[in-house]
Amino acid sequence: MIQKILWATDGSEDSLEALRYVELFARRLNAGVVGLCVIPDYPEVVEGFSSEEKKRFEDWIKGVREAEEKRLKDIEGEMRAKGISFKIIVSTGIPDKEILEVSDREKVGLIALGRGRAKAGQTLGSTSLKVIRGSKCPVLTVGKAKDKLDIRKILVPMDLSHHKHKNLEFALWLSKKFKAVVYVLNVVEVGECRFPPEITEGMKLYSQKSILENLGRAKLSGEADIKAHVEVARNAYTGIVNFSAAEDIDLIVITTYGGRKFKNDFIGSVTERVVQESPCPVITLNPVV
């Protein structure tokens, strides 16, 4: 399913943390790696430059390209010494567009990148957000890697309003590669309401029953180690993030939205908040691609 991984790097701490997971996944999945650095070329700004300013900008681009090629060459040497195939691409352009174009051209099965820095009013860095929205393949987003790097617990948030669970299928496939336990979680959202305990318990029991019915409809391998959980929280993303922290989850696998008829580049607010606030890496999948 994943024979090649695209690691998009801008030299940030987040992208270097993502590299640690790229190495882990490449080893377990026997996959090659493409290391991509995109140097922003700001065409709309450069267009108004004088000839002298354009020359200075071109020299700057050249210097950055040489530095990035050297940096990636060093990483390539380290990866190849560990038996991992590594290809270098340094390009100029708009980062998110270049990442998606290279992903298609190289036929990668997974894109890995750092969360990036959020701007005011946003929860994710703009490049990460646009890549998650536009990618046809799964995207691994990393904030800070854990000290002990392994995938032993995988969390799959389950929306009970529909019966297609692409994230569950993908998580089960990964669990076999990593010998991991899969936690299937449904969050009962109560908002600011303070329901009586018996009402809350009834909601949890209904959700638990629905999870088991969904799992029963899925084609599960007898070897799959799956644990079903229901949590009550103010909203879905809070429940997912808190459960991840409490259970020391290593990886969350979530769809970009619930799978209803939205544009392909849509990302739901729950997924966006989970990616930004999760204490562990998150893999997002477009449910209709």
Image (tube, rainbow, N blue to C red):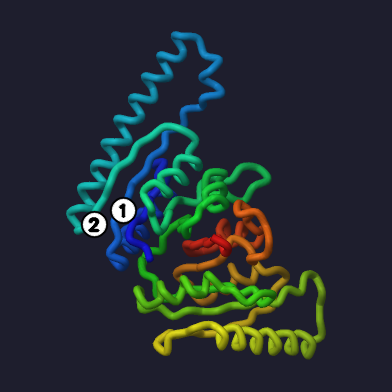
Mark 2 Cα-neighbour bin, 10 Å: few <14, some 14–19, many ≥20: some
- Quarter holding residue 69: top left
* In front of the other: 173 or 178: 173
Q: Residue at x 46, y 51 (%)?
A: 114
Q: CA distance from mark 2 to mark 1?
A: 7 Å
* Residue 6, above or below 92: below
From what the image shows, is residue 255 above or below residue 61?
below
Q: Which mark is residue 84?
A: 2
Which x, y percent locates residue 211?
A: 61, 84
Q: Which residue is mark 1?
A: 33
Q: Residue at x 36, y 29 (%)?
A: 64
Above or below, comparing residue 201 to residue 4 in the picture:
below
- The amino acid beneath tag 2 is Ile
Q: Secondary structure at mark 2?
A: loop
| For residue 269, side relative to residue 68 (left or right) | right
Look at the numbered disc 1 and give the secondary structure of its residue.
strand
